Image (cartoon, rainbow, N blue to C red):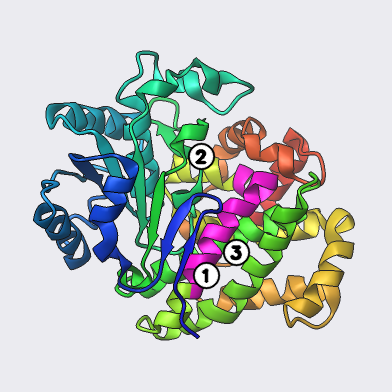
Amino acid sequence: MTLVGNWSYPTAVKFGAGRIKELAEACAQAGMTRPLLVTDKGLADLPITKQTLDIMEAAGLGRGMFSEVDPNPSEINLHAGVAAYKAGDHDGVIAFGGGSGLDLGKMVAFYAGQTRPIWDFEDIGDWWTRADADAIAPIIAVPTTAGTGSEVGRASVLTNSETHEKKIIFHPKVLPAVVICDPELTVGMPKFITAGTGLDAFAHCVEAFSSPHYHPMSQGIALEGMRLVIDNLPRAYADGTDIEARAHMMSAAAMGATAFQKGLGAIHAMSHPIGAIFNTHHGTTNAVCMPAVLEFNASAIADRFDRAAGYLGIEGGFKGFQSFVQEFNDSFAIPHKLSDMGVSSDRLDDLVAGAIKDPSCGGNPIELTESNLRQLFQASI
């Protein structure tokens, strides 16, 4: 099977091995002639980044790059990125990398033309309407991991460096105009990043599938996304050069982020404050939290997972799925408890306070309270 496609849902996607070579065409499609490539510190000096800058330069697009992006990007990174964007007289952003590079790149394009504080655009009610939509620069997204799905998302996660809270900044025009999904860019990912990002995609699909909101399209996408992760993450983990497995994981990542328009839940409500306070890897944190959340939500989700389990190749319905999740985590050397990642119960009050305010709470099938969130954190720590 040839894994190549040109898709327009949820946005224009150029999918297939080697398609980074079409970057100049994508820039023309998005209407940018002087793009700024935004990526993270770890990617800045890697061959895939140099290759991309060479493609830009050969097409007369320059080789502007900003890479002062932390693993959990903050408004400090954002202000520095906007300064670089304005200093280089850029007219668009190529968001390049994993979740941090993609999220920060999207925010640079969003915020470069705004005048209000960034926190005024948090994903609360209709706050997004405060933005000057005409001042949002075009965005091309190029994922180099297969996990967050931020390349097809209309929001970014930013950490407030003063309060250590993760905030979701949303606007419809933050959805990239063109996405290049080239699985060859993910070949060099180390095993622990392959696992952590892949399990992030899995968590997105599991939580979207569990959400009580009505969105049958997202429900179907979430189910197939889970299957792709189950079938292909072990292959990509065992052999990073398995392009077919890498491609299916790249699809699963985009599917997870498309599906969670239906909602997320307690896993993400917990992992956002954990990441903000303890600077843990997001996908790995999700994986550690998942068993406790599945048990907590059991009464509301068992029936749908009983039906899904057969399609996923798992025996025993929901109970079998629960057992599978722990075994799946173990196969990638994921810690059993958050304490193994440096998370301590002395910040429990702060974790609960951050979680109860997280918008992901609204998608959990059982209403979340400070009391039951405290119990979930204690069970996971």
- Name above or below for residue 85 compared with residue 333: above
**Cα gap from disc 2 to disc 3, whole angstroms:** 19 Å
Q: Amino acid at mark 1?
A: Ile
Q: Earlier in the sequence, mark 3 or mark 1?
A: 3
Left or right? Give the position of 10 relative to 66. right
- Residue 167 x, y percent position in the rendering: 50, 32
Q: Mark 1, residues whose alpha carbon is within 10 Å: few (<14), some, or many (≥20)? A: many
**Callout in the foreground (2, 3):** 2
Quick one: SS at disc 2? Answer: loop
State how far apart marks 1 and 2 are (Cα).
Answer: 29 Å
Residue type of the residue flagged with mark 2: Arg
Specify whether 85 is left or right of 140: left
Magenta stretch: includes residue 272: no
Q: Which mark is residue 365?
A: none
Any magenta on residue 259?
yes
Q: Label 2, on which residue?
A: 154
Count residues near mark 3 (Cα–Cα under 10 Å), then give few for <14, some for 14-19, many for 20+: many
Task: Name the magenta segment's main secondary structure.
Answer: helix
The answer to which of 334 and 224 lies nearer the viewer is 224
Label 3 with label 1: CB-CB less than 8 Å = no
Numbered circle sitting on residue 334: 1
Residue 202 badge: 3
Viewer-side label of 3, 1 = 3
Circle 1: element type: loop
